[in-house]
Amino acid sequence: MSALTRFLGDSPLRVILKLLVVSFLVGLVMNAFGWSPMDVFYGIQKFFIDLWNLGFHATDRFLGYILLGAAIVVPAFIVLRIANYRK
């Protein structure tokens, strides 16, 4: 078994034939949906940008909830500490 065959997992001719068949089927499906390779690239790019923005939006909401709760909890904590200080 040659290094090339070991790397490809099969003989080079069979790998080329498999790639041609799969490329034809993928091209057929993409044409049926009206997609281009750039549409797929932009879709993947948009997915990661939306995921990134969603993460920061979730962090923003999380920090907003913490600040909202802290507006009540911190003054109550200070009042309770002052009230219990004399005991």
Image (cartoon, rainbow, N blue to C red):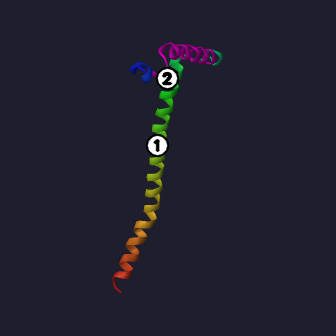
The x, y position of residue 71, in whole percent, is 43, 62
Residue 18 belongs to magenta span: yes
Q: Amino acid at mark 2?
A: Phe
| Whole-percent x, y for residue 19 in the image | 53, 16
Is disc 1 placed on a helix, strand or loop?
A: helix
Q: Is residue 33 left or right of 58 when viewed as pictured?
A: right
11 in relation to 72, above or below: above
Q: Is residue 55 above or below residue 48?
A: below
Q: Is residue 53 above or below residue 13?
A: below
Q: Which residue is mark 2?
A: 41
State the residue lying farthest toward the bottom: 87
Position of the N terminus, as image quadrant, is top left
Image quadrant assignment for residue 34: top right
Could you tell whether 17 is left or right of 56 in the image? right
The region drawn magenta spans 8-30
Residue drawn 37% across the image and 72% down it: 78
* 7 is within the stretch colored magenta: no
Which quadrant of the structure image shows residue 74? Answer: bottom left
Alpha carbon separation for disc pair 2 and 1: 21 Å
Residue 84 spot, x, y in % from top left: 38, 81
- Residue at 45%, 65% (x, y): give it: 72
Q: Residue extending furthest front? A: 1
Q: Residues within 10 Å of mark 1 (few under 14, many from 20)?
A: few
The front one of 39 and 22 is 22
Residue 55 circle label: 1
The amino acid type, in three-letter code, at marker 1 is Gly
